[in-house]
Image (tube, rainbow, N blue to C red):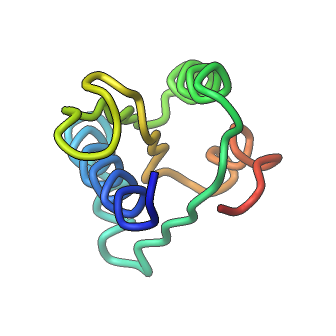
Amino acid sequence: MSIGKTSAQAAHASVSALEKCRKHNPGWARQWLQSEQRKIVLRADSLRELKVLETRAGGLGLPVAMVKDMGLTEVPPGTLTALAIGPAPSDKVDRVTGSLPLL
């Protein structure tokens, strides 16, 4: 994906994860919104890795949002393009993402 497409997909994932967090853990959402609203963009090497990360994060009770693209521009419809984890305490998120490289 182009830089612009990647950025848009990350933004979609971030907003979706915040909405899920507001429903299931409003304290984490409120704390995140009142602080620096940290976002760290990391790279996964495969779709399989994204799915493993999604499962691990969900198993820890973290807000998770996977983006499935509509396929109107660069990728086929239904392509999984981004995964957001959080907002949540960084020590909990790091248990899932701590070994991933920065994008």
Which residue is located at x 66 percent, y 50 percent? 43
**Number of marks in the rendered image:** 0
Query: Relative to 31, does residue 80 appear above or below in the rendering?
Result: above
Q: Nearer the viewer, residue 28 or 17?
A: 17
Which residue is located at x 50 percent, y 24 percent? 58
Query: Which quarter of the figure has residue 15?
Result: bottom left
Residue 97 pos. (x, y %): 70, 44
Query: Relative to 38, does residue 17 appear above or below in the rendering?
Result: above
Q: Nearer the viewer, residue 66 or 61?
A: 66
Query: Which quarter of the figure has residue 60?
Result: top right
Q: Nearer the viewer, residue 62 or 50?
A: 50
Query: Which quarter of the figure has residue 11?
Result: bottom left
Residue 21 pos. (x, y %): 30, 43
Which residue is located at x 71 percent, y 49 percent? 94
From the image, which quarter does the C terminus lie in? bottom right
Which residue is located at x 28 percent, y 62 percent? 30
Residue 14 pos. (x, y %): 34, 54
Residue situated furthest bottom in the rendering? 36
Query: Relative to 61, does residue 73 appear above or below in the rendering?
Result: below
Residue 49 pos. (x, y %): 67, 26
